[in-house]
Image: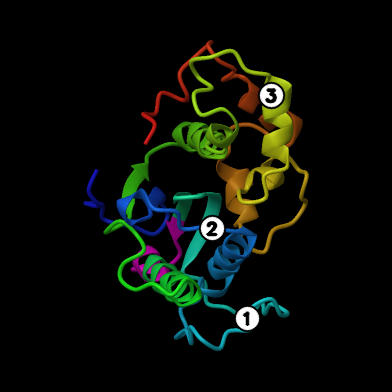
């Protein structure tokens, strides 16, 4: 789906993209950590010095945020976000910053050149709190494919999946399950205000409702 969406303050959007030619964009843990830091540092309307940010150092709360981040998941060759613009062109500016900044880091580290991401990111309007809630589940279940690539079609050990998801460090699920109480990245109040179920045990049961082969994954086509 092409990006033909008019972004408006107060609305939520599913944003996703992958590596060019489906290539890996996170090769090791340091790449994931760098991108997670990118989500924090580049969520600021002030001009960004891509080379001299205080990576790994103390973070500042004095930011003019571009977007609210409600959900995220990083996979080896793609990522998913749920974002809401906090100002005009907030999403466009944020995505341009993280795409440029992370590509510069990745290309320098791995001695490559050219585009890292597959063209324009995709964007879909989220038109209800119910859809938002189900979409968070779809996004948070993405890493299951790393453990069981065809988990929807075959018998799997759900307890093993639950343990794997709880230990997966590159998504917002630990906050939704209350494994982590705070987040410097997520807009926690927006999540609580628009999720139609409670965080913690209720959300964990909600995740478990898609145990195969009982139902399709939120009715959303897998990408």
Indicate the secondary structure of the residue bearing disc 2: loop
- Residue 162, by quadrant, is top right
Residue at the spot 72% in from the left edge and 26% down from the top edge: 160
Where residue 108 sits in the image (x, y, percent)? 46, 77
- The answer to whether residue 205 shows anywhere in this view is yes
Q: Is residue 64 above or below residue 125?
A: below
- Which quadrant, please, contains the N terminus? top left
In the displayed structure image, the side of residue 3 where residue 200 appears, left or right: right
What is the span of residues highlighted in magenta in the rendered image? 84-94
Mark 1 vs mark 3, foreground winner is 3
Mark 2 vs mark 3, foreground winner is 2
Q: Which residue corresponds to mark 1?
A: 62
Where residue 94 sits in the image (x, y, percent)? 42, 68
Q: Which residue corresponds to mark 3?
A: 205
Residue at the spot 62% in from the left edge and 27% down from the top edge: 207
- The single residue placed furthest to the front in the displayed view is 111
Q: Which residue corresponds to mark 2?
A: 27
Where residue 175 sits in the image (x, y, percent)? 70, 47
| The magenta stretch spans residue 135 | no
Q: Which mark is residue 40?
A: none
Where residue 110 sits in the image (x, y, percent)? 47, 71
């Amino acid at each position: 789906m092409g990006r033909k969406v008019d972004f408006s303050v107060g609305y939520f959007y599913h944003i996703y993209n992958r590596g060019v030619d489906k290539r890996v964009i996170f090769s090791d843990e340091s790449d994931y950590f760098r991108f997670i830091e990118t989500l924090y540092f580049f969520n600021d309307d002030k001009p960004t010095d891509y080379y001299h940010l205080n990576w790994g150092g103390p973070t500042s709360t004095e930011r003019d945020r571009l977007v609210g981040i409600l959900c995220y998941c990083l996979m080896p060759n793609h990522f998913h976000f749920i974002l809401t613009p906090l100002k005009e062109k907030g999403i466009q500016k944020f995505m341009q910053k993280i795409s440029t900044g992370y590509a510069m880091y990745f290309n320098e580290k791995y001695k490559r050149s050219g585009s890292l991401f597959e063209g324009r990111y995709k964007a879909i309007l989220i038109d209800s709190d119910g859809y938002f809630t189900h979409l968070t589940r779809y996004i948070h279940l993405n890493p299951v494919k790393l453990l069981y690539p065809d988990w929807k079609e075959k018998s799997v050990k759900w307890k093993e999946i639950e343990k794997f998801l709880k230990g997966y460090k590159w998504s917002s699920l630990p906050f939704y399950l209350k494994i982590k109480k705070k987040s410097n990245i997520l807009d926690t109040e927006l999540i609580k205000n628009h999720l139609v179920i409670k965080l913690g045990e209720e959300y964990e049961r909600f995740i478990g409702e898609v145990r195969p082969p009982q139902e399709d994954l939120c009715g959303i086509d897998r990408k």
